[in-house]
């Protein structure tokens, strides 16, 4: 099992058409975002331009949550609003226009990923899944088996557990949690 801790400050920002993005992780590590050859990607982006169009990606689906306010957007012609930290899932081929400025969390998963769970949690959980993501929404402490991590808002912990070991996670603050498998 491998645990990678990425603080918000350690992640370099790069420009996209509507603002800046911070890529916390991409898997496999040698994958290139622009080549669309990755299994999953965890990022956070600022939305500075209104309106802004979401990039389409064939073969992927996404989870998004605003980190600092409400989100107003149009999905395939239907107006929607999501509260702060409220997750919404969508196909990466959907036509989405955002009418909100702020910072979002974005998880992209290739469509062949299985057994996925993505939720906002503040309670302990256990899993044997090979990929586990913890994205802090508030300052606190995260326990992973016998290790403890102090987290600040928007820090990310990625656990690679390809051995299928039992991973016990303790949380004392709201956290975006995800875990999944990639078929071999």
Image (tube, rainbow, N blue to C red):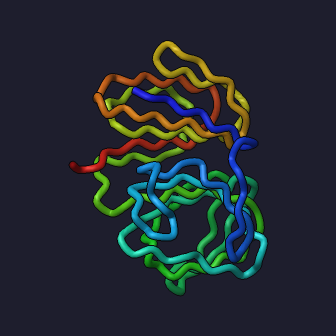
Residue sitting nearer the eye, 113 or 87: 113
In this orientation, which residue lies closer to the viewer: 65 or 162?
Answer: 162
Q: Is residue 96 left or right of residue 160?
A: right
Give whichever of 139, 3 is nearer the camera: 3
Spot occupied by residue 156 in the image (x, y as percentages of width and height): 60, 39
Judging depth in this view, the residue of 160 and 104 nearest the camera is 160
Residue 178 drawn above or below residue 145:
below
From this view, report whether residue 27 is shown above or below residue 139. Answer: below
Residue at figure coordinates x 44%, y 57% from the top left: 31
Work out which residue is located at the far front of the displayed protein and give it.
Answer: 30
Q: Residue at position x 43%, y 22% from top?
A: 168
Instruction: Relative to 169, say whether 56 is above or below.
Output: below
Q: Residue furthest top?
A: 146
Q: Residue at x 68, y 61 (%)?
A: 21
What residue do we see at 44% from left, 29% from top?
A: 2
Residue 84 in the image: state x and y as whole percent: 68, 54
Q: Residue furthest left?
A: 184
Q: Indicate the quadrant where residue 39 lies.
A: bottom left
Quadrant containing the N terminus in the rendered view: top left
Locate residue 20: give its quadrant. Answer: bottom right
Tell me where residue 141 appears, x and y as whole percent: 65, 23
Q: How many numbered dots are placed on residues in this image?
A: 0
């Amino acid at each position: 099992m491998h645990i990678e801790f990425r603080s918000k400050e350690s992640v370099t920002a790069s420009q996209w058409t509507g603002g800046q993005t911070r890529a916390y992780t991409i898997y496999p590590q040698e994958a290139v975002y622009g080549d669309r050859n990755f299994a999953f990607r965890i990022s956070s982006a600022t939305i500075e331009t209104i309106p802004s169009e979401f990039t389409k990606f064939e073969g992927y689906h996404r989870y998004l949550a605003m980190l600092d306010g409400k989100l107003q957007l149009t999905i395939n012609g239907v107006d929607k609003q999501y509260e702060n930290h409220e997750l919404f899932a969508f196909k990466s081929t959907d036509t989405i226009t955002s009418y909100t400025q702020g910072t979002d969390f974005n998880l992209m998963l290739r469509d062949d990923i299985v057994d996925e769970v993505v939720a906002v949690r503040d309670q302990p959980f256990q899993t044997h899944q090979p990929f586990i993501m913890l994205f802090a929404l508030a300052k606190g402490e995260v326990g992973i088996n016998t290790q403890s991590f102090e987290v600040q808002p928007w820090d990310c912990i990625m656990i690679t557990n390809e051995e299928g070991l039992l991973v016990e996670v303790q949380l004392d603050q709201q956290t975006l949690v995800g875990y999944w498998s990639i078929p071999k």
